[in-house]
Image (spheres, rainbow, N blue to C red):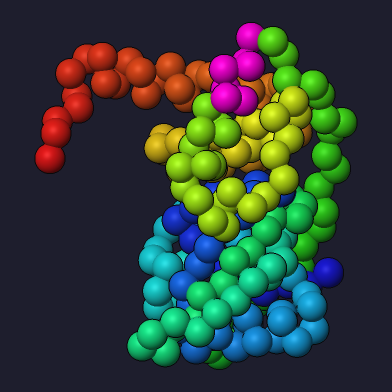
């Protein structure tokens, strides 16, 4: 399957919601085509380059997503909301004349979901608090607070640790292994701040 690619400084998981502001002609055309054809595009993390301008180098694992809402914004911007559908592996990539990347992608096999272990119940509560604080469109998604896959994915998306670590978690197949790697990332954050590296602005 060939799908357009949207490299971003963000990591989106299946089931996740992400609002975007679109202004570059290549992505305006992409959104128009996706809405017309009810087709998908792939969000993938940038490895090298910028979100704007020439095509950036990207990670080879991303998430195919669909557009669930759109609106016209001031100054010629287009606002869209997307929802992650499934993880994909990006194979050969073609750069179109307008710098839009189109990749040949394969869906990745997902391991069976697991019930969230009791030791992570506080994480489910934390996810709920974060989403309600963020408001729409995040708060409109269906909560799955007993799902190890869903809770781990949402915390990875929302918490402020390195994008490379988030990408590593996205590439893990098993939901409980994802939780273990997420716990390691959270411990690194805690160690960072307890060492006095935080400075108020």
User: Does residue 152 sit above or below 137 in this rendering?
Assistant: above
Q: Residue at x 49, y 61 (%)?
A: 8
* Left or right for 117, reference 43: right
Magenta stretch holds residue 122 = yes
Answer yes or no: is residue 6 visible: yes
In the foreground, 30 or 77: 77
Q: Residue at x 57, y 33 (%)?
A: 128
User: How would you classify the magenta stretch by its main secondary structure?
Assistant: helix
User: Does residue 163 sit above or below 78 in this rendering?
Assistant: above
- Residue 96 sits in quarter: bottom right
Q: Percent position (x, y) of residue 132?
A: 52, 42
Q: Percent position (x, y) of residue 188?
A: 39, 20
* Left or right for 8, reference 138: left
**Quarter of the image where the C terminus is located:** top left
* Left or right for 73, reference 195: right
- Residue 114 sits in quarter: top right
Q: Residue at x 29, y 21 (%)?
A: 192
| The residue stretch that appears in magenta | 119-125
* Left or right for 71, reference 62: left
Answer yes or no: is residue 7 visible: no
- Residue 155 sits in quarter: top right
């Amino acid at each position: 399957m060939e799908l357009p690619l949207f490299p971003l400084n963000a990591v989106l998981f299946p089931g996740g919601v992400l609002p975007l502001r679109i202004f570059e002609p290549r992505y305006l055309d992409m959104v128009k085509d996706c809405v017309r054809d009810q087709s998908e595009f792939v969000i993938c993390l940038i490895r090298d380059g910028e979100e704007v301008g020439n095509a950036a180098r990207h990670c080879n694992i991303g998430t195919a997503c669909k557009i669930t809402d759109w609106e016209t914004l001031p100054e010629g911007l287009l606002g869209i909301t997307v929802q992650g559908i499934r993880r994909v592996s990006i194979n050969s990539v073609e750069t179109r004349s307008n710098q839009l990347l189109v990749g040949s992608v394969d869906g990745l096999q997902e391991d069976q979901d697991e019930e969230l272990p009791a030791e992570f119940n506080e994480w489910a509560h934390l996810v709920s608090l974060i989403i309600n604080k963020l408001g729409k469109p995040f708060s409109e998604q269906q909560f799955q607070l007993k799902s190890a896959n869903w809770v781990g994915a949402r915390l990875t998306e929302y918490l402020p640790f390195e994008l490379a670590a988030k990408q590593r978690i996205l590439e893990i197949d098993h939901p409980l292994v994802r939780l273990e790697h997420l716990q390691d990332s959270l411990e690194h954050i805690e160690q960072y701040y307890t060492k006095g590296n935080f400075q108020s602005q």
